[in-house]
Amino acid sequence: MFRLGTVALTLTILTATAARAPANPASDALRQRASEELYSLDDERSLATWREATVADPQDAAAWRGLASAALARIAMLRGTVTIDSYLGRMGGKDVSLPPPPPELAREFNNAITRAITIGHQTVAAHPNDASAHYELGAAVGIKASYMATVDGGIMAAFRAAREAYDAHETVLRLNPRRADAGLIVGTYRYIVAAFSLPIRWVAYMAGFGGGKERGIHMVEAAAAYPGDNQSDAHLALVLLYTREGRFDDALRQLEILRNRYPRNRLLWLESGSTLLRAKRPADAERVLNEGMARLAQDSRARMYGEEALWYYRRGSARAAMGQMSVARADLDRSIALEGRPWVHGRAHLELGRLMLASNRVEAREHLQAAAKLGDSDRDAASAERARALLKDAANTR
């Protein structure tokens, strides 16, 4: 089930780049470059370029919003929460304590998003019938909601900010129905609200959110087809929504578009391999993951926290699914030995436990016990429950 935190989390993806509102030519060019850098995983360079854009035009709300987005993206990289796994709703239960962001990044985010929202409110007040003004305000408040939910942990405050973002972008569509780019946030929220349990869904309706899975998906598809600056955001959002719906071929088509557009973003190869695994195409997954790992080996840029552990877990899972036991075990052992998120290590232990049930039950049991413990510690209830089920089956068949 989607949780309120997931609603705001999704906006981290959807507002990763800033649309080009009218600005002076210098700021406009810098924002275009900064967006390209951000989606190409040049996050430090992107931060620097966004800073230049805010100097070029201090009254450009989109530049301040972009700077805030880049700071939030950098925080996500440091925490290991960049991949689609963080947005699939696989996690349930109590919150996990993640390390606080570096103070300088937190300060930069808060300063930038405050400036963006302040300028947004001023522009809307001066031009209440300007769709672009409402778009900028809603996008900025949406990023604030993301930060509240994923960094500060203030879910209820994030909910209120998310409602403001939703209302602002509904206003955009009312003022200019052709602005399909505004349907990205509105459509995603509609999809998410429709996935709530009935009591929570009614609370969301009472708060002013609309619902409707199919309508939501169609709105995001329209945003992806619209020649606006958030097309890449919409393609990535569709990867998330299609994956949740089990439409893996559709998700893979979106990832192909993004890989062609951003060939330096190695994480798109990781996402493609992960999606192929979900589609039960392990041979194709191994091929794509091998290509991505070759790119990783040649890439001297900063890694996402736990990135290598995730690559090895994914490839080990693909090889295990193909019955390549020795190389699968080598990858999974490597994943566990590397620094990474507990849920990644837990799933690697789960794969090893499954592989070893027929040959070494003592060691298999140790891996499965570790998988259950690690899954519980990092909100990966599905893998923890699977590990316990395998432990129970093994005990019953001795």
Image: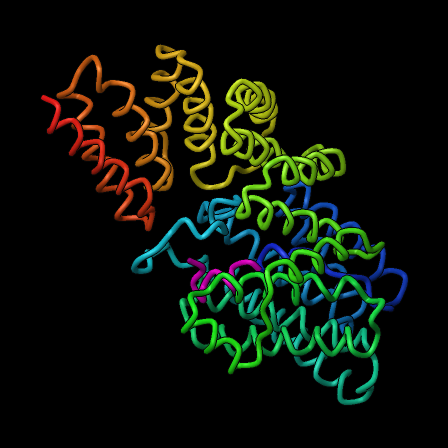
What is the total number of numbered labels drawn onto the structure image? 0
Using the rendered view, name the quadrant where residue 275 is placed: top right
Q: Residue furthest bottom?
A: 125
Q: Nearer the viewer, residue 190 or 45?
A: 190
- Magenta: main secondary structure equals helix
**Residue 196 in the image: above or below residue 292:** below
Q: Nearer the viewer, residue 378 or 179?
A: 179
Q: Is residue 109 magenta?
A: no
Q: Is residue 219 left or right of residue 289?
A: right
Residue 78 locus on image (x, y percent): 47, 47
Residue at the image point whose x is 70% and y is 60% from the top:
51
Q: Nearer the viewer, residue 375 or 340?
A: 375
Residue at the image point whose x is 22% and y is 31% from the top:
390
Residue 204 locus on image (x, y percent): 50, 75
Residue 209 locus on image (x, y percent): 57, 75
Residue 26 locus on image (x, y percent): 87, 60
Using the rendered view, name the quadrant where residue 230 is placed: bottom right
**Residue 360 in the image: above or below residue 102:** above
Residue at the image point whose x is 59% and y is 50% from the top:
241
Residue at the image point whose x is 16% and y is 26% from the top:
394
Q: What colouring method underlies this structural image?
A: rainbow
Quarter of the rendering occupied by the N terminus = bottom left
Q: Is residue 2 magenta?
A: yes
Q: Is residue 378 left or right of residue 298?
A: left
Q: Is residue 135 left or right of residue 211?
A: right
Quarter of the rendering occupied by the C terminus = top left
Q: Residue furthest right?
A: 25
**Residue 394 in the image: above or below residue 268:** above
Q: Which residues are magenta?
A: 1-10
